[in-house]
Image (cartoon, grey):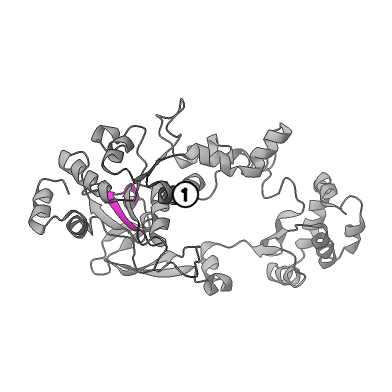
Amino acid sequence: MRALDDILVLDLSRVLAGPWCTQMLSDLGAKVIKVEKPGAGDDTRGWGPPFLTDPATEEKGDAAYYLAANRGKHSVTIDMATPEGQELIRHLAAKADVLVENYKLGGLKKYGLDYDALKAVNPRLVYCSITGFGQTGPYAPRAGYDFMIQAMGGMMSVTGEKDALPGGGPQKAGIAIADLSTGLHAVIAILAALNQRHRTGRGQYIDLGLLDVQVSMMSNQAQTYLVGGKAPARAGNGHAAIVPYQAFPTQDGHLIIAVGNDGQFAKLAEVLGHPEWAADQRFILNRSRVEHREVLVPLLEAETRRFPSAHLLDALERRQIPCGPINTMDKVFDDPQAQARNLRQEVPHALAGTVPTVASPLRLSDSPVIYDRGPPLLGEHTEVVLGDLLGLDAPAVEALRAKGVV
């Protein structure tokens, strides 16, 4: 048994935040019906390169971007702009436990697929709306994209090198952190709403805004401003409240040294050949090291440059000083810890046979994630889903297909 194998999810979302949420629900066992536009599908199917290639014809298939967020789902093509398509979705929603959508404010109301309309046919429905700015406020009608949300929510104000240094200035994260974080928060909210439904028998509406999530993810940086009254600034790879806690140069590259307490600093000083640093009043406590950062960091850098990365890494690990290499993705999956944890998995795929995928980090002892369903082809499950859930026979589905409804 899987944790959510009694849950049916109707996925009307596209791109990343919504699909990331529904992929995680699928990993946990939910049956996820991904509704896509006939002939087009999720925008990310075309967001490449790279693309999955048909081994027989060499033709390009779906992009890696799409494959990353749609594992384990059932793809059904329905044109919701048609009355017949709207009716099909209403019938599916009547059977669903959860609906996830990320249309702009009011985008589904004109189709009769908004929460109030669907609650009337399924009072137990948990309906999750994901937008850039939520359902209220002056920005609610605006479209919201991860890059602009990172900027507006403060992420880019603390990410990147200091303005005065080469390469300084605002920098976005290397992943779509606002989208991914919103997907995770959507899962949390949905699971909470399902638990509430166990007590009340009623579903509810979930209003998730990317900006709200991004601001909450600022965490200690936001709280630093709220308490201290001063907006934090960019610090490159350094940490505003811990020293040394950053990337350091070596003979052949860089590595991370993350000293979390004064005892670890004393051991670091010994490894680097300067045990006297641990007794220096400027460096003896973390608060004094933060105060004298501009003195200490150059001293540390001068010593770390003398070592090859592998040699220094080994020396630090033997003294249990937190450290690590800065891996590219190929080295991530070659790492023995990643291999021991099986972070690369293979899932079935109707076109390629199998495709690689990144493992779920959720490790449940009694209901583990099972990698038996890959990302679906566009419309791959239309006939099966409409037959099994709505009782439509093959001629009925073909009639809808002839009209362009599915």
Q: Residue at x 22, y 57 (%)?
A: 385
Identify residue for label 1.
192
Residue 371 higher or lower than 21, as above or below: below
At 47% from the left and 46% from the top, the residue drawn is 182
Under circle 1, the secondary element is: helix
Residue 38 vs residue 349: left or right? left
Report whether residue 332 is seen.
Answer: yes
* The N terminus lies in quadrant: bottom left
Q: Nearer the viewer, residue 141 or 33?
A: 33
**Residue placed furthest toward the top:** 138
214 and 134: which one is in front? Answer: 134
Would residue 228 be found to the left or right of residue 190 on screen? Answer: right
User: Pointer 1: residues within 10 angstroms few (<14), some, or many (20+)?
Assistant: few
Residue 175 lies, in percent from the top left, at 50, 50
Q: Quadrant of residue 134?
A: top left
Near-viewer residue (95 or 245): 95
Magenta span includes 37? yes
Image quadrant of residue 373? Answer: bottom left
Query: Does residue 211 belong to the magenta stretch?
Result: no
Amino acid carrying mark 1 in the image: Ala
Which residue lies at the image location 71% right of the left edge and 35% below the top edge?
227
Residue 345: x percent and y percent?
Answer: 43, 69
Q: Which residues are magenta?
A: 29-44
Q: Quadrant of residue 403?
A: top left
